[in-house]
Structures are given as C-alpha cells and as structure tokens.
Image (spheres, coloured by chain):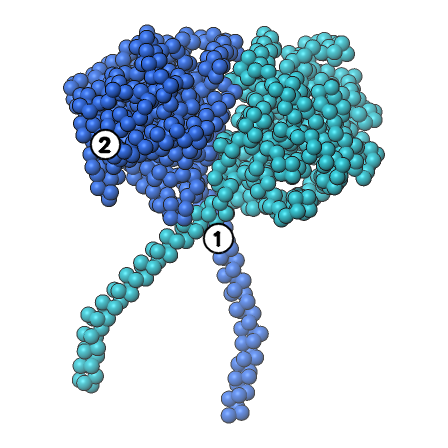
Chain colours: A cyan, B blue
Amino acid sequence: MACLLQAFRSLSAGIVLSVLWGVALGDKVLVVPQEGSHWLSMKDIVELLSHRGHEVVVLVPEVNLLLKESQFYTRKVYRVPYDQEELQTRFLSFGNQHFAERWYLTAALTEYRNNMIVVDMFFVNCQSLLKDSATLSFLRESKFDVVFTDPALPCGVILAEYLGLPSVYLFRGFPCSLEHAFSRSPSPVSYVPRCYTQFSERMTFSQRVANFLVSYLENFLFYCLYSKYEDLASNLLKREVHLPTLYQKGSIWLLRYDFVFEYPRPVLPSMVFIGGCNCKKLGVLSQEFDAYVNASGEHGVVVFSLGSMVSEIPEKKAMEIADALGKIPQTVLWRYTGTPPSNLAKNTILVKWLPQNDLLGHPKTRAFITHSGSHGIYEGICNGVPMVMLPLFGDQMDNAKRMESRGAGVTLNVLEMTSEDLANALKTVINDKSYKENIMRLSSLHKDRPIEPLDLAVFWVEFVMRHKGAPHLRPAAHDLTWYQYHSLDVIGFLLAIVLGVAFIVYKCCAFGYRKCCGKKGRVKKAQKSKAH
Amino acid sequence: MACLLQAFRSLSAGIVLSVLWGVALGDKVLVVPQEGSHWLSMKDIVELLSHRGHEVVVLVPEVNLLLKESQFYTRKVYRVPYDQEELQTRFLSFGNQHFAERWYLTAALTEYRNNMIVVDMFFVNCQSLLKDSATLSFLRESKFDVVFTDPALPCGVILAEYLGLPSVYLFRGFPCSLEHAFSRSPSPVSYVPRCYTQFSERMTFSQRVANFLVSYLENFLFYCLYSKYEDLASNLLKREVHLPTLYQKGSIWLLRYDFVFEYPRPVLPSMVFIGGCNCKKLGVLSQEFDAYVNASGEHGVVVFSLGSMVSEIPEKKAMEIADALGKIPQTVLWRYTGTPPSNLAKNTILVKWLPQNDLLGHPKTRAFITHSGSHGIYEGICNGVPMVMLPLFGDQMDNAKRMESRGAGVTLNVLEMTSEDLANALKTVINDKSYKENIMRLSSLHKDRPIEPLDLAVFWVEFVMRHKGAPHLRPAAHDLTWYQYHSLDVIGFLLAIVLGVAFIVYKCCAFGYRKCCGKKGRVKKAQKSKAH
C-alpha cells in the first residue's frame, strides 16, 4: 500500500511538473560532473532535465568510471594523460587502503593521502580540460544557458566564470562545510559538528572544544585541496582569482539535505534541499532478484553493498564478513566483484550489481549493510530499512554517527570488528523492534513533503535559466571584507570612542583633582616642611 | 494572457494539493489571531484549511475590528472589559497620530506611544482570555491538534504551552526581528538592516555603526512589549516563564517573506517562506468598479489605499492629497471613509472599500498609492504595479525603502510632502518606464515558484498535525546557554590554556636565564667590584 502511494505520488509530481511549469523550452545545459558516486544523483536530475526537453551536454574525461553514454545527454569527451588501467588501479588502491590498519595519531594524514589517490587524478582531469583549447572553443561557441556542476572540486565553478554563465551547484557537504564556508552561511561551532569529528549536534564541553579547534583546520584543508585550482583559474581567466569569490557566484546550491538526516542549522535562501532525490520510483525486481527474495522465506533478506567505488575488499576481511553473514537466518545479497571468500555460507549470494533501492523497498528486506555513503543512507531512510553501517572514508563516519544517534542503525569499525560483532549487529537491528520503528518514523517525516526533491531540483535549474541567475537570493555579505562582515571595524571604532571618552573623563577628573586637592596637598606639604 | 496563466497556475496548485497530499482527515485547528491587518493573510490560510476538511475554531475578543463571522470557521468569543466605541476611538486616534508633527529626537518614543494605543488593548484581550476559566476549560476539553497563531504578541504562544499542543506561527517580521532573535537564527548586523533604520542591505560605515547600536535596542523593545506577558504566562502555567523559550517551541514559522522584497539573510530550516500568500486568484471586478475602470480611458486608473487600519485622515492632509490627485490625468480610486475633502477633483472617486488585488491586477491600473504595509506591497509585486509609498507606522518605512532601493516605487514622507510632491511622484512612476520594468521583473521572479505560498502554508500546518510537531527541524542551539551558544566558555578555556602555557614557558625561560646568565652576571659584577 505504501509502495503504491509512493508510486502514485511520484507520478502525480511528474504530472504537476508539466501542469504547473508548462513544457520546457529546450534550453542548453552544460553539466560538469564529479566522477564517482557524486554522479549518481546528478545523473537522475540530468535525465529529468533531458526529459523536459533541454539539450544536455556532459563534460566527460575520456577515461572514467561511471560517466557512461546515455540516451539522455550528449557527452563531450576531453583527453586525459592516463589510461583505463591506471584509473582502475587507483580506485582499487583507494578502496583497499581503507582496510589497512592505521595509527591513531596519523589517521587524519592517512585518510587525506588515501583520498588524494583519486583527488589528484581529478585535478589532472581539470588541468587537461582547461588547457584543451578545442574543447574550450566548443564550449564558448555552444552558447549554453547554465552550468550545472558538482562543486566538490571547482572545475565547473571556474568554467562557469570563464563562459560567463550562471551556475547551479549540486552538493552534499563534503569536503567539510564547503557550502557554508564559501557562501558565508553562519555555522555556529557550538552546535554544528564539524566533519570527521563524529560528534552529534549535542556536544559535551570537551567535544565543543575539539569542534572549535577542528573548525580552524577546515581552512587548511581547503588550502590543500584548492590552492592548485586557484592557479589553474588564474591562468585561464588571466587575472588573480580568489576561489571563494568564484563559488559565491553560484546562483543556487541544490543540497542533498534532509533534516531527518542532517542536524538543523542556519542556511541561506539560495540553498534548496533535495535530500532523497536519488530514491527513484520503485520499479519491479528482475526475475533473478525476485527469485532470490521469494526463496528467502519468512526470514527475508539483507542487502549488502559498500557503494559504487568499493566493490571488492582484502581477502582476510572478506572472509570475516562472510563468516558473520553465515550466522544469520536471512538470505544476504552482497554486491561483490572480488574473488569469492572460500568460507561463503549458503545463505550469501554474491552479485556484481544489485538494484539497491528496489531491493530496499521490498517488504521482505530486513536490514541494510552499508558503507553509509549519503546515497545509500537516503535509500535506507526512504524505504525504512534499519542499517548496519561500516563507514570507510569521507563523510561516511559522520553519516553513520547521525543515523546511530537517531536509533536507526548500528555502526561498526570495519577495521576492528570481528565476525561476531557484525553478526550481533545484524541480529540487533533485525530483532530489536526499536530500530525498525525509528527508521520508519524518519521515513514518514522524510517522505512527507510538499514537492518531490527531484522535481524541485529541476525547477531551480530551469529557474536559473529563465532568469539568467538568481541575483535576488545573493546576500550582501559577499560584498563585505572579513572584518566588515564580523563588524570588527565597527566594534573597533566604538571601542576607540569609549576609550577616548574614558581617557578624556579621566584626564578631566585628574586635572580637577590636581586643581582642587593638589594645591591643598602642596600647601599641607609646605606647611609640614616649615614645621620641620 | 499573464492573468490567465496565473489563474491556471493557482487552479492547478489547488488540484495538486488534493492529488499529492490526499484529502485532509478533519483535524482540529485552534487559531489565535492578531487583530488588525495581520489577520488578512491568516484568514486566507484558515479558509483553505477549512476547505480541506479541518474543523477550525478562531479565538475572538467580543469587541473587534476585523475578526468577523464566517462560514469557514467557528468563532469562540471571549469577553473583554471595553466596548466597540472605545475600540473605534483607539483605532481612529492611532490612525490620526501618524499625521501629527513629531520632533526628530523624540520620534522613536512618539512612534512607540502611538503603537501602544492599540497594543495595550491587545494586552487587555490576552489578560481577559487567560483569566476566562470557562473559555480555558472549553479549549482544554476540545482536544485540538495544533495551535495556529500570529506570534507578534505572545497570547497564542502561551496558550499552546498551556494546552500542550504543537504550534505553527504566521509572521512577517514585526516587531523587529522577533523571528530571528527568539529562534536563535543568526542575524549578522553587518548586512542585515535592523527595523526602523530604513537602511538597505548595503550600508555605509556610519550606517553599520548605527545598525550595530540599534540591534542592542531590540532587546529593550522586547522587554517593553513582552515582560507583562511573561507575568501572565507565569500565573497561568504556575511556574517561572522565559518567553523566548516558549517561542522556541513553535514547530514552524510561516514567514511572509519573499526575497524579491526581503534582503537575503540566514534563516533556519523551520522557516517556510510564503510571501505573497495574500495575493489571491484574480476574480472579476464588480459592475461598479468595472465601470470606473472602463470609463478611465487611455490614461487608466490609480488605486489608493492606506490599509485596513487607517481609512480616514486629518482634513488638511486629505485636502493636500486631493489637490495632488486632481493634477494627474488618471482616474483615482481612493479608499476613504472620512468626510470628503472639499477640493476633491472630478477624476477622484472615494469608496468605502475596494477590491484591491483585483483592481491592481487590471491592465488599466497604472500606479498604486499605498501606506506600504506588507500585504499591499505583495499585491503590488504580484500584479506588477509601480508604487507611490506613504509609510505611516511599524515596518512600513522599511518596506518602502526596500521597494525604492529596487527601483519599483517612490517614497514620500506623508508629514512633509506637499501636494506638488505627490503629483510629481505619481507622474514619475507612471511615465518613467524603468519603474514598470523593475516591478515587472520583481513580479516575474516572485511568481516563478515551485508551489503556491498558500498551499505551502496549509501543507505545513497539516504536517505539524500529522506528526504532532516538527522536532527534526529544531536546532540544538535551543538547548545551549547564551555563553555556550557563542562558545565563550570554550574560548575562555582555550585562552586560559594558552596564557597558562605562556606563563609557564616565561617562568621556565626566566629561571633558565637566571641560572645561566644570572651567575655569569653576578660573577662579572663581583669581578668588577674587585677591580674597583
């Protein structure tokens, strides 16, 4: 019944889109995506834009992981100085590194280095693109109406400036607080936990101290990630570039936020919340998966995936996990492309790909083992499935903390957990009813919205095209220096006045005192001297 | 064509409401309104709630101005210790006071006193209600699902706490920044102009100094307005009450904001923007008004109203205005209930009431003379009519400044303006095409929205009823003390550590210096002494 209602709502929203806003006029959208899992929700929006009659061109490096051909868009491919083998090697190494032991004190540095395995490759992509005069010339001549980009790395932001086009950003909040730091959206350190801290919105005093200190490290992270791009941009635009100023030119931030998942915090009017836009309408399971689910009997199934970027893991860990999965009565559908663990139990089925959202939406699904990437978490919320979370990198630890703090799942440290831990966690989220109740409550709040997030995303991209931006949503904060923004010049001026007045009053009093008492004092002193 | 499109859009939105959200289940809504113009947009929402099948009870003082009977809601009337005559006298006096000369230095105090003429009466209403045991007993027994209230004055906020019900607020931002101050929504003084300053979002240094100082006066204003209510609440709830804490329990702030009118600024996720919800679908003009408009010829008409609370003005000022109106070729439709000015020109028609939004939506309407109350301004924006603004009290001066800064109208000081000034202002906004172009640009931005504001308002009231609140939108800021919120304890702690470490380092260095150089120094000194 719930599924039918959801399908009906989505269908209705689709109708609404055309009834309310009319048929689109075939504008030209330039999409500058972010390779990897970020592309998954952007792809859904791009497909709907195409469906609405817009001409969509996606800028794609010739060597890539997920940016494949599609009937919904034209790919404009640019050359990069590495081959498919290096890409595969880097992603495999990136995945495996997250299962290597790390020393507590250097964990942050190790995490940074692991991420740089792929982030460096993305920089090479951007460098190649911005030096590819033929592609740049094509982009200039194509007369696009908007740049739709993922601003996690700033290639699209720079291109929008180069082409003089308004832009729409699609973002989730990683790297840390970028959307707030660069857009000057206040982010009080007292109740907005910084990323990698795994704090909840309710922090102890010591956590608030740590959060305060970490907030200053964010600037350092931005410097490490983006200073090279500033040089790229300066070369292309032939002037000195301050990257946050470029980011501030984005018209709309489509944020994959929903406050059943995020902690409530201040935002700006140019921020539009489309969390859950990746939970597409429930389809029908293929014969293969339908058979698996039906054969699971009363115990149902557990869905297991570590996301689009990690599909195989070191053998030892795989065997530990396989052992745990064998201890539960449910059938486990595990997306895994590596060598099958030798101890794989009969209840565990390895598949190279699985229809994650459709499986999660099946009433026989009892739990979801996930790396807690934001896409997976939203699919878990949409479908009301309790989770066992094995966060690996990036925002995943914080995501897991959020869901755990809401009683909707259990988090395990993938490096330290034993086979027993995983089996117990699974039994807990399946058998302890509170997990199901909590995730169902979050699900009902999340799905109760005036408009579907995917439709909202498309509306705002079209809005920016219709009005050539959204300047009425741009806060005047962007025109202030940092000290003006914090009113430091005003406070300094008022302090100077107060101190000046205090000084004058003091001098006047001192002068008056000398005039009145000083003479007496001198007279008394003189009299005393005479007496001696 | 534009009108047809607008009508079609509204109709579609109405259909959407039922298609997307289903038919409402007949929940019970308790409405605690604010007498005066605030009621106008609340009434529209209440009517739609009733239309959706909810049982709506509106709490009404037996003596009132606009809170009349309706087929859409039941009125629960409570007794008040004054009569209709006193009400009329107070409103007349309130209106007239705004036309009295005031001294620059005491203008703020005079404005405060003028407002208190009616605000004091509203306090008496609340006092009477909260002491009316029969009415309170009725409210307790009625088992409402939500309190829908205007929180400009806190009677509804207190009642929601007393009845233990979730609440939804409808608000526009007056008294000054209440919605931000009480909900801990950051309000940077460097680019968010405070009310009564008439500053735009781009302030000079001296304006920023003034804005900084005025921001501290807001707390004083809140104290003057609300301290009496705190006592009322304490008596009713039988415990000490901190009013901002009560306000923070509101689930949703429905804000009559739109950023073509407001300056963009930080907001909270529990704030929903429904600016323009009072611009109801365009109807058909009655025969009387249709005849006036058609007879106006090529010059068209000018619509003139000073709002629902000021329908007559002192004779001298009325004559000045009548003189000005006679100098333009347009027909002027003036809502005026006082004695007709003796110099009224032939082109000016006095009416006791006018269908403002429908008249503004007529293609023959050339300009709108308004007191720049927020309702009128939104109707001007919706219909794209340039304005001549004669602000009188409250937020009207700031509203006028906003529209003027966007080139959509001209502001006049109603006390100082001459007949010539008014005539010239009218000629300017009618003949200088830039005013029409600017207001049409604002209009197109304002009306380009994914969902109609009235529907959005109803959605959120129903949401709060369905989920018994919206706790997932409540920021953890509400659980912090003021010094924790600003991280002052953290900063103090870190400063203490830094100073402690610096002190220890200094002492160690000093000790080391004495040990190393001190001995040498003493040796040298000793040698020197011996040499002598």
- Which residue is at a point 22% across and 30% down the rendered structure image? B320
- Which residue is at a point 65% across and 13% down the rendered structure image? A282
Question: As drawn, is A135 to the left or to the right of A238?
Answer: right
- Mark 2 surroundings within 10 Å by alpha-carbon count, few (fewer than 14), some (14 through 19), many (20 or more): many
Identify the image quadrant of residue A243: top right
Upstream in the sequence, badge 2 or badge 1? 2
Question: As drawn, is A128 to the left or to the right of B65?
Answer: right
Identify the image quadrant of residue B160: top left
Location of residue A175 with respect to B275 vertically, above or below: below
To which residue does mark 2 refer?
A: B98
Whole-percent x, y for residue B373 in the image: 33, 27
Pointer 1 chain: B
The tag on residue B179 is: none
Question: As drawn, is B401 to the left or to the right of A209?
Answer: left
Amino acid type, label 2? His
Closer-to-camera residue (A89/B353): B353
To which residue does mark 1 refer?
A: B495
Whole-percent x, y for residue A162 in the image: 65, 39
